Image (spheres, rainbow, N blue to C red):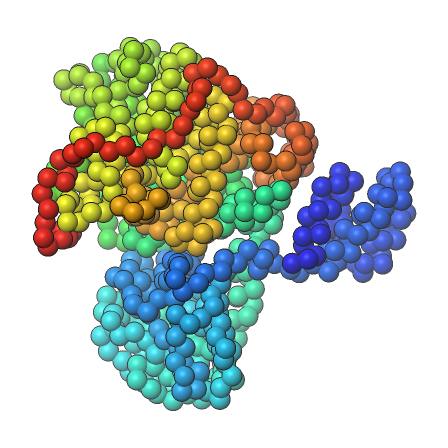
Amino acid sequence: MLLPSAFYVLLRYPAVTKVMALVQKYVSKHRFTNVLRMFAEMKTFDNMKHFLILAASAAILSCCHNVYKTDQIGIRVNAEENREYSYTDKKSGYWYGRTHQKETEWWSGWNMAKKRIMADYSLSAGDIGLDRSEAECTVYPDRLVRTWGNAIESFYLMDDHPILFIELDAKASDISCSIDMERISGTEAIAEGMLFTPKEAEDKRILLSPATNCSHALIDNGISTPSEAGGFILTYGTVQECKDLVKLFRKSGRKMLKERKDRINGLITEFNPIRSNLEDLDKALDWITITTDELITCQQGKGIYAGLPWFNEYWGRDMFISMPGACLVTGQFEVAKDILKDFAKLQDTDPSSETYGRIPNRANLEGILYNTTDGTPRFVIQAYELARYCGDTDFLTDLYPAIKTSIESSISNYTDSKGYLTHADADTWMDVKRNGIPGSPRGNRANDIQALWHGQLSAGSNIASIIGDTASAIKWNALAEKLSSNFEKDFCDKEGSMIYDHLNSDGTPDKQMRPNQLYCLELINDTAFNQKVTRRVWEELVYPWGVASLAQWDAQFHPQHENWHYYHKDDAYHNGTVWLWNNGIAMQRMIEFGQIDAAWELFKNMNRQALHEGAAGSLSENADAHPREGQKWVNRSGTFLQAWSNAEHLRCWYQHFLGIRPDLLNNIVVIEPKLPSEITFLETSVRIGNGKLHYRYDNGEIHAELEDCDAQLVICSPSGQCDLPVFKNLTFCSPEPLKDYPCFKTYHETALTY
């Protein structure tokens, strides 16, 4: 750890950062003495000090260029914490577990294409069972390591192949592995090891074998093998596929592990390296970047899992909310193109269908549902945003038929006389239904849907102009202007400093206090009003742990997400429960109005969650709005790793704290940093088009340059906290419950269930 730390100190010197790319280029190809000779012959150094600094940096690099950053950011977990962790194979499989688990939950273990095939396994070294509760455990981005006095276990998944590798280095003559039989219907011994038949996939098998070609013996529900085998592998498929995968791993396993590690490491060294004066900031961003990428898979074409462990499928809404943070700010432009193209193929193209023109709300291997209004606008908006980031418009030609169908079908079937997009009362992101009854009905014209519809029309108009469909461009732009001209009159309560959550079918406004209004500010030409709305939302909905879905003064408010003795969790889902993905827009609005310190406090709290709470390296779907009795902080809930929670955190960091906003369609890249005072030094680079933006902030000064990108670079001076009177004495929302909530009227002796 000493060498990398010294290296980061050296990076603060401008002379070092100026030629660091050159150092790295040559140090990997030449001996250190040759690198020094090369520098000595250069004419760019005006004194020996610069030369010595660069020589030292070259020496450090020559020692460290094979050091993986992923090996330096492991998260140590003790038995009391027993934190969740997960890995995917980037195709259709994932593993979920707890670091020190003894008991499993219904979602624990190995899942392949939404089938729960195996719950867990246990290990022994000689006659001694390896008790996880006694292990020292570290979670790394590419593996889980458990250490005992007599053994070290390292657990891996492989990219693109259904293989688990359980490496076991033990001080014993033999080692053994047994499979939890909870999800297994039968076993069979074969020459390669033991076969297990999953209950949920009885046409497939799991094969447990020694990691190398060693002898083995059968034991109860598993095998033992000499410790020289180095551990065990589990493969999944038909019997022959399992055998072939065993051969593949034994031949190329180390190479496959290295390729996976290189890929993961590249996410934080080649695409989005981050170095600052705040170690926890760097580590949290690295982890959140990696766990977000974990969810980009190829299960049903290219897509992004909505979350783990039970949303391992593609949700259109979630996917396109997540795309900016998962793909655009991280420079994965080709991945984004593939996702858009693959999802466009799933569009409802039946003109007689009620959902004609929609992109799926949910796509999995069992079928497709189109029951959402907001996924389709986001699809079009992200197609345009991708073009602005990468500068390529060729892919838009492929997408344009789907884009045009999505807009024209909405105009024909769902648009009212004022240009608003109508919908069913549960066809927004607040979509839960129980027994067919919406849990948070939002009329037929929700405010965020109108903002998205306006965005879809505007993005569609711009794309149509690029394609050459001038008539559509003019038509859609005119409808966007019509909508915006009506919105402020119909949706704004100027005296109450709020934007109505929705209009009911009879035209009456709904005055429940929800966070959706933050998505609508671009439709309102009144800065002072927008500032008042932002302050009110922050103080009534934004807790230190995230943004609540309903104000606590509302009678429908539910203080905790899960409180089964009083109510079903779905009743609370959008009626008080905190949703971390809304943190992104809340922080964005505060930053836009110069309230950087408040936004930064929320951002830091999320970084702390990723590093020290819940699932290692990730952000959860939900949290309680109010702490439970005796607690000072809330419980997390929902999925433990949620794509849009992670992705919105990253989007806000890059686009609003760092202020990096490319528009290569107009050949310009704007940088408008708004960093908190705690950050005094920061260096990063991000992909822009086919090149890179190198970005350095040092004590209030910003230095940036584009590499292999000929766009105009506009750098705005860093701006700090702005003392606007409207935000004076601003605070987080704090729990102040009503004396009575209807949800607590009835106590159920037997807890409710699904």
In the image, residue 254 above or below residue 677? below
Question: What residue is rendered at 51% in x and 83% in y?
Answer: 171
In-front residue for pair 735/109? 735
Residue 216 falls left or right of residue 61: left
Question: What residue is rendered at 22% in x and 14% in y?
Answer: 417
Q: Position of residue 726 (x, y in %)?
A: 43, 16
Residue 143 falls left or right of residue 357: right
Question: What residue is rendered at 65% in x and 38% in y?
Answer: 681
Camera sees residue 445: no
Instruction: Name the quadrant containing residue 578.
Output: top left
Q: Residue furthest front?
A: 630
Instruction: Name the quadrant containing residue 390.
Output: top right
In the image, residue 180 above or below residue 728? below
Question: What residue is rendered at 24% in x and 78% in y?
Answer: 186
In-front residue for pair 192/606? 606
Tag count: 0
In-front residue for pair 376/497? 497
In the image, residue 529 above or below residue 582? above
Pick the quarter of the image with the N terminus.
Answer: bottom right
Q: Position of residue 69 (x, y in %)?
A: 60, 55
Residue 634 falls left or right of residue 700: left
Q: Position of residue 71 (x, y in %)?
A: 57, 60
Camera sees residue 737: yes
Instruction: Name the quadrant containing residue 309.
Output: bottom left
